[in-house]
Amino acid sequence: MSNTVNCASIEEVRSNIDRIDRQIVALLAKRGRFVKQAAGFKKTAEDVKAPQRVEQVISRVTALSQELGANPSVTEQVYRAMISGFIDAEITEHAHPVSTSLDTQQPLFQMHFQETTIRKIGETVMESQIFNFGF
């Protein structure tokens, strides 16, 4: 399958790549919204990591890349990186849920403490303390 546009200049090539990048990012945002929904159905970090599902997706997209004339190796690398990023986001979502939940498997009280220090002219100054209570 080839939908190649023959460009007359590097600027035209870059313009087409920029247009495609915009479409890819829009699709990533759409995919991310579904990933966020999926996180709501998962109870543990292992459910989030779902290595069997990752391998299913990789198999499916590498086969699809061959069908569509894309480089299967690049497709696999991109998908593994993307999935890893979404897994990290899901784990963060699980650690710091935005919505309240009466699910007994969710901790009713969470505290996240982050301390940042700044060094100013030989003294240490506390910049921020962040407390996150998930109840």
Image: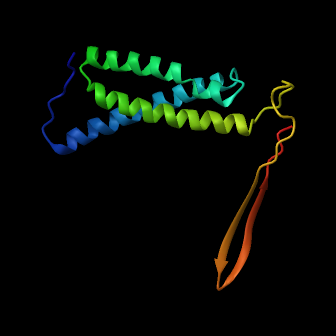
Residue at left offset 58%, top offset 28%: 49
What colouring method underlies this structural image?
A: rainbow
Q: Quadrant of residue 126?
A: bottom right
Residue 49 seen anywhere in this rendered image of the structure: yes
Q: Is residue 130 above or below residue 93?
A: below
Q: Quadrant of residue 105?
A: top right
Q: Quadrant of the N terminus?
A: top left
Q: Position of residue 40 (x, y in %)?
A: 70, 24
Between 77 and 100, the residue placed more toward the observer is 77
Q: Is 57 left or right of 121, judged from the image as shown?
A: left
Q: Is residue 127 above or below residue 38?
A: below
- Exactly how many numbered labels are in the figure? 0
Residue at left offset 52%, top offset 37%: 85
Q: Is 39 left or right of 5, judged from the image as shown?
A: right
Q: Quadrant of the C terminus?
A: top right
Q: Position of residue 53 (x, y in %)?
A: 52, 19
